[in-house]
Amino acid sequence: MAKTIYLDYAAATPLDSNVLAEMQPYMTDAFYNPSAPYQPAREVRKDIEEARISVARIIGAKPTEVVFTAGATESINLAFNIGGHMVTTTTEHAAVLQAANTHDATLVNVDEKGRVNPNDIKKAITPKTTIVTVSFVNNETGTIQDLKSIAKIIFDERQKREAKGSTTPLYLHTDASQAAGMLDIHVARLGVDMMTLNGGKIYGPKQTGILYFNSSIDLQPMIVGGGQERGLRSGTENVAGVIGFSKALEIAEKKRKTEFERLENLRQQMLDILQKEFTDIIIIGDQKHHTPHILTAAWRGLDAERVLFALESQNILVATGSACAANKDTRSHVLTALGLEPGIIDASLRFSFGRHTTSDDVDTAAKIIVDVIKQELARGKRIK
């Protein structure tokens, strides 16, 4: 049977074997409830706190500023559980947009490459705004946002509020789920007050993540009960998940610089092949400000969904838009926000590369992708 070539790492990553090895003892021998008083349980509690210290060190935070969550969606909802007016962009992940819908929120448009103008964020801020949230890297296009410039705007607005005697807080949150292991996620250098990370995107276990929040923020819990995670997330801790997330982030950070360069080369390799074969290919997203592991392209007149299934039959796994949008059978809101016409959106494919992708994989996959796309384009012309 032919090898399956997986090109959808932006949707999910396989669990790293070293991460699994770190997790296994907590699913068998070290199964104790961390809140129990006896020594084996206290050892498990100690391991959780050491994992927290490791995560905090990597992102440049205090351990008390890290809350372990059941993935990015919970992290985002916890971050937004403050109230007040919110400002975000039209290209955020569905988890951000749906959570923002429960607040008074202003959505700011992006340009045709998916970048938001920081001045447009500035104009959307009102005296009642408490949270500005902008994803670091878009999951469908790979476009990187200028968080540092947005952070400067937030800082200046705080200064103005203080001068006027206003006590309304203003915080900058980012969903950096697609950035971890690719870009610098040190919170002070980014200038963010809150940050979401997702274990399932960094070769860690699914349903794990964190929320970093500056110690000055008065977070309110969504889940109450036993008071775990300093009262912000009650419930017996997912110890294996916490340990796994911490190890995955540690590995991702160690590999970051070399992996960035390697994946950028793979992305360019795929892009060169596709552009050589298709002079009319449409590359989606910002080609100057992009993450190395995501390449999204479209072909006018192509039925991307048919291509996806044809590729799967030849053991090539890719995506059309985001996995979340695909499951709802809806057109990508991200690509719609870029101003792309429906026909282009429906003709788009996302290729995302990862730790196990090789240059030979790209060559093999690209040849099959080219053949399938040419066949489908020819089929479309015959039907017309």
Image (cartoon, rainbow, N blue to C red):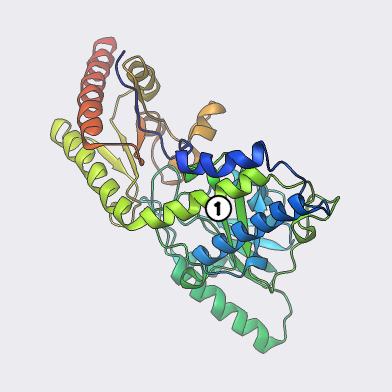
Q: Quadrant of residue 379?
A: top left
Residue 47 lies in what quarter of the image? bottom right
Looking at the image, the residue that sits furthest to the right is: 225
Q: In this view, does 261 lie to the left or right of 28?
A: left
Residue 189 on image: x %, y %: 46, 72
Q: Where is residue 42 in the image (x, y as percent from the top left)?
A: 75, 55
- Which residue is depicted at the point 73% across and 63% down? 84
Q: How crowded is mark 1: few (under 14 residues within 10 Å), some or many (20 or more)?
A: many
Q: Position of residue 255 (x, y in %)?
A: 36, 53
The one of 365 and 84 positioned closer to us in this rendering: 365
Toward the left, the furthest residue is: 276
The residue shown at (41%, 46%) is 338
Quadrant the C terminus occupies: top left
Query: Residue furthest toward the bottom?
Result: 163
Can residue 87 be seen here?
yes
Q: In this view, does 245 lie above or below 165?
A: above
Kindly identify the amino acid type of the residue bearing the numbered disc 1: Ser
Q: Is mark 1 on a helix, strand or loop?
A: helix
In-front residue for pair 189/332: 189
Tag 1 residue: 246
